[in-house]
Image (cartoon, rainbow, N blue to C red):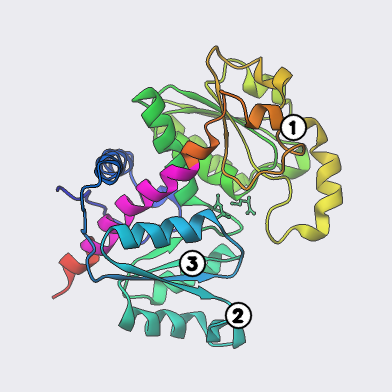
């Protein structure tokens, strides 16, 4: 099987990848998905190891990476902050150097994005961002892979993101812009996406023919949208602001009347975990419009494609 070629050693943010690289990951992920469904072995990473550092909770990321490595013939190790010396003051750099002697790739879920960057700077093996406060690239890749499966092309598709301008919003904006989608983001003023990400995403959209718009009004954002996306109002690490956030975001719930403003056949997306009745109504989440579990499943397939591309690239460059 032809493995997608990727120039970057690591995946820290979606913009580490070009449009062509993302599309080649999508077609490779589709092949891996078909093979897995048909029960055909695809042990492309036989005997390879992935270390997974978790400083925040996870269901999907942990299980999809672990299942993915197993299906590829390798193995993944779950390293929670409470179990490794990183949590007791060993440096990120030393952790990177040590793990690089044992494993073929490292996934990290942490708070500051700079920590993932530091890990990557000192690792000899690929580092994959499994969510930081700023980005969630694996999620955005899975989400646009889901859109690609539904539409066969992402170019020109309109995705409206409604809610908190957080890590998931950032990665969706960048990924959508790189793929030529129209991304409309509606957030309250205080929870708008970061200025730097907005500028970067707008630059990409100018290059690739889509658009990125930021507005306050959810109704304006979702108008004629093909996909309406939301995420939790209180991300991991923001628990102290929970009440303020719930107040500021109360008009940003995805409900039936908001969804009715989307394009005919519009689909509803959420990276999960969802807080039903908060950012999304139960009857929308469980409706025929919802593709949230397809998104969750596709984490597995796109990450398998990514693991093959990154791990085999690094091995092929070894003397
Ligand atoms: N969407 C996502 O990353 O889920 P987990 O927090 O369960 O990994
Ligand atoms: N924005 C959420 C995503 C969880 C997958 C968080 O960071 O908690």
45 left or right of 127 in image: left
Q: Position of residue 195 (x, y in %)?
A: 62, 45
Quarter of image, res 227: top right
| Residue 142 appearing in the image | yes
Query: What is the tally of numbered marks visible in this picture?
Result: 3
Q: Position of residue 151 (x, y in %)?
A: 39, 23
Read off the residue under disc 1.
253
* Quadrant the C terminus occupies: bottom left
Task: Label 1: state its secondary structure.
Answer: loop
Magenta range is 296-312
Task: Label 2: state its secondary structure.
Answer: loop
Which tag, 1 or 2, sits closer to the chain's start?
Answer: 2
Read off the residue under disc 2.
82
Residues at badges 2 and 3 in contact (C-beta under 8 Å)? no
Q: Position of residue 103 (x, y in %)?
A: 32, 76
Read off the residue under disc 3.
108
Instruction: Identify the residue shown where x is 39% and y is 85%.
Output: 98
Mark 2 surroundings within 10 Å by alpha-carbon count, few (fewer than 14), some (14 through 19), many (20 or more):
few
Task: Give me the C-alpha separation between circle 1 and circle 3.
Answer: 30 Å
């Amino acid at each position: 099987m032809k493995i997608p070629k990727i120039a970057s050693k690591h995946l820290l943010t979606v913009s580490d990848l070009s449009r062509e690289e993302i599309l080649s990951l999508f077609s490779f992920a589709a092949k891996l998905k078909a093979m897995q469904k048909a029960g055909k072995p695809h042990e492309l990473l036989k005997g390879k190891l992935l270390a997974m550092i978790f400083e925040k909770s996870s269901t999907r990321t942990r299980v999809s990476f672990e299942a993915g490595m197993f299906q590829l013939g390798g193995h993944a190790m779950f390293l929670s902050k409470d179990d490794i010396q990183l949590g007791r003051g060993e440096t990120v750099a030393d952790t990177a150097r040590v793990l690089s002697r044992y494993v073929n790739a490292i996934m990290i879920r942490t708070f500051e994005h700079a920590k993932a960057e530091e890990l990557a700077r000192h690792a000899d093996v690929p580092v994959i961002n499994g969510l930081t406060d700023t980005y969630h690239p694996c999620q955005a890749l899975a989400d646009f892979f889901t859109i690609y499966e539904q539409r066969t092309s992402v170019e020109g598709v309109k995705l409206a993101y409604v809610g908190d301008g957080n890590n998931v919003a950032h990665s969706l904006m960048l990924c959508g812009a790189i793929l030529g989608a129209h991304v409309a983001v509606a957030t309250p003023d205080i929870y708008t996406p970061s200025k730097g990400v907005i500028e970067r995403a707008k630059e990409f959209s100018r290059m690739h023919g889509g658009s990125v718009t930021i507005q306050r009004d959810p109704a304006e954002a979702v108008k004629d949208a093909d996909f309406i996306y939301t995420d939790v109002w209180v991300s991991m690490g923001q628990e102290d602001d929970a009440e303020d956030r719930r107040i500021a975001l109360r008009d940003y719930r995805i409900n039936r009347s908001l969804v009715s403003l989307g394009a005919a056949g519009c689909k509803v997306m959420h990276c999960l975990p969802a807080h039903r009745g908060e950012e999304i109504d139960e009857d929308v989440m469980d409706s025929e419009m919802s593709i949230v579990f397809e998104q969750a499943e596709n984490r597995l397939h796109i990450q398998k494609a990514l693991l093959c591309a990154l791990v085999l690239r690094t091995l092929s460059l070894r003397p």
